[in-house]
Image: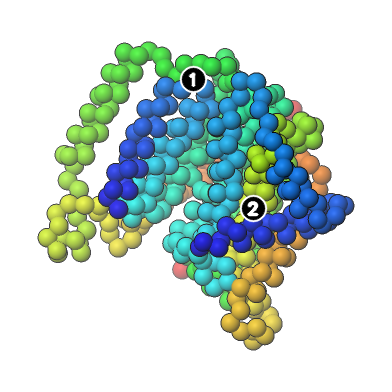
Amino acid sequence: MVLLAPALVVVAGLAAAAGAATAGEGPTAPVVETLRLLTKQRRRTLSDDPALARIGLTALPVAAVLALAVVPLGDRAPVDLGVGVVWFNAMEVVAWFAVWVVGWGPNAATSLAGGYRVLPLGLAYELPHMLAIITPAIAAGSLSPGVIAAAQHDLWYAVWMPAAFLLYLLSVAAMAFWGPFAAPLGRDLAGGAAAEHAGLDRLLLLAGRWMLLTAAAAMAVPLFLGGGAPPPITGPDPFPGLPVLWFAVKLVVVLGLLLALRRAVPMLRMARFATLAWTVLIPLAVAQALVVTVVVLP
Amino acid sequence: MIALVAALGAVAVITGLLVFTVDSMARATFLLLASFVAVAVVLIGFGLGYLGTVVILMMTIEMMIMVVFMVMLMMNPAGLMPMTMVHNRRGSWAIALVAFGLLTAGVWLVPFPVRASAASRGVTSGPAVGPDPTVALGDALMGGQMLTMMTLGLALLATIVGAVAVAVSRR
């Protein structure tokens, strides 16, 4: 449990390095940027609210660590919570609040507009996301990620409920306001919510975003990819007793899919994504949940 | 445990009071959220893990939806200008005191059920739970109407999605 936060920082840092490499920068760019931000001063603006902004900036990485705490890393979770799936969902919506106050704090127009963009984004992704994480829980008959992972020894839920898995990946990127959903920090707003933050403040925001993305990618492993167990088709486990290894391999695959999503899809306008979510993604998620419910109905 | 719950109760009351003393919408929203989260952690401390977690989830989303309404309806939509958080002081005091009196009376007058294992040890009060508090809560809230409520929920969602689909196609 104590090692959870440093471990998440390291893995998120590696993910950021891979992200920089796929974006055409050197893989050392996140390290250079971190050191640069640590040596710079924080920025103040006229009649701002730095206390509130820093509450949001701190809440982002803290929420990522608390969300990861219920994810089984290998065979069991650091905190084995019976309602882990709901807890994970509660921690990730803290990001809405965090980005909104981060944009609010500096009392600047572009920053405020960036902070407000997280609201249509959240209202668009949240319902498909909730339905996508509840569908494996329905199939396994439990809200505990450990039990859901153990219920997939015959067939991964990613295979059995592909729509839920795809919606999960999409909504994870939206939750971390990342890739095609980076409008709250968009270039068209000169950086949006991050525009007026420098030094440690900016580091917390950008690192917190990678930590949130990594924690959410980690949750995909127990929910859809069978947790720390080897794939059902490979037969006996070639690395018995090393569920952490299988977990790490699957986490890398999920993170790779998310990085590919950023490469493949340009930044979406919030209004268009909201329309897509409410007219296509929510009905799709309900249909997927319905199919799974009818199949597992005793 | 009791000390922790009492401390969180105090946090909930104090942050709740502070909501009315600040002059910024954002600070008021944060303090209200902090108050609700403190109550949610009290619920988790009582062994109601699902209920407490759902309170954190719902209240965080609800505060953000309140911000959407703030943008839609308020004179000062960005909310950056200082503003007072109170109006109609006398009426508010009356409503607050009546509600407080009713809820406090309810706490002492409602006969709380007692957990079977605790009753066998001679305890006659305390948080009441069945074998699974989540199941017991769902049963107490909906009982035999569970299927009706689930169907209703789906029908409402379908209505919302239909309304959105009709609204956006008129652009």
Q: Nearer the viewer, residue A143 or A247?
A: A247
Kindly identify which numbered label has been placed on residue B23.
1
Residue A138 x/y as whole percent: 51, 61
Q: Nearer the viewer, residue B10 or B59?
A: B10
Query: Would you say A222 lies left or right of A185 here?
Result: left
Badges 2 and 1, same chain: no
Query: What's the residue at 58%, 82% (across, down)?
Result: A241
Chain identifier of the residue bearing label 1 in the image = B
Residue B79 x/y as whole percent: 57, 21
Q: Nearer the viewer, residue B48 or A75?
A: A75
At label 2, the amino acid type is Met
Query: What's the residue at 46%, 44% (across, down)?
Result: B56
Residue A263 x/y as whole percent: 82, 52
Q: Nearer the viewer, residue B167 or B25?
A: B25
Chain identifier of the residue bearing label 2 in the image = A
Q: Is residue B30 above or below residue A214?
A: above
Q: Is residue B140 visible?
A: no
> Do the CB atoms of the residues marked 2 and 1 lie less than 8 Å apart?
no
Query: Badge 2: few (under 14), some or many (20 or more) residues near its Cα, within 10 Å?
Result: many
The quadrant holding residue A121 is: top right
Query: What's the residue at 27%, 50% (across, down)?
Result: B2
Q: Dot 1 lies on which element?
A: loop
The extreme front residue here reads A39
Q: Is residue B20 above or below residue B41?
A: above
Q: CA distance from mark 2 to mark 1?
A: 33 Å
Residue A78 x/y as whole percent: 50, 65
At label 1, the amino acid type is Asp
* Mark 2, residue position: A211
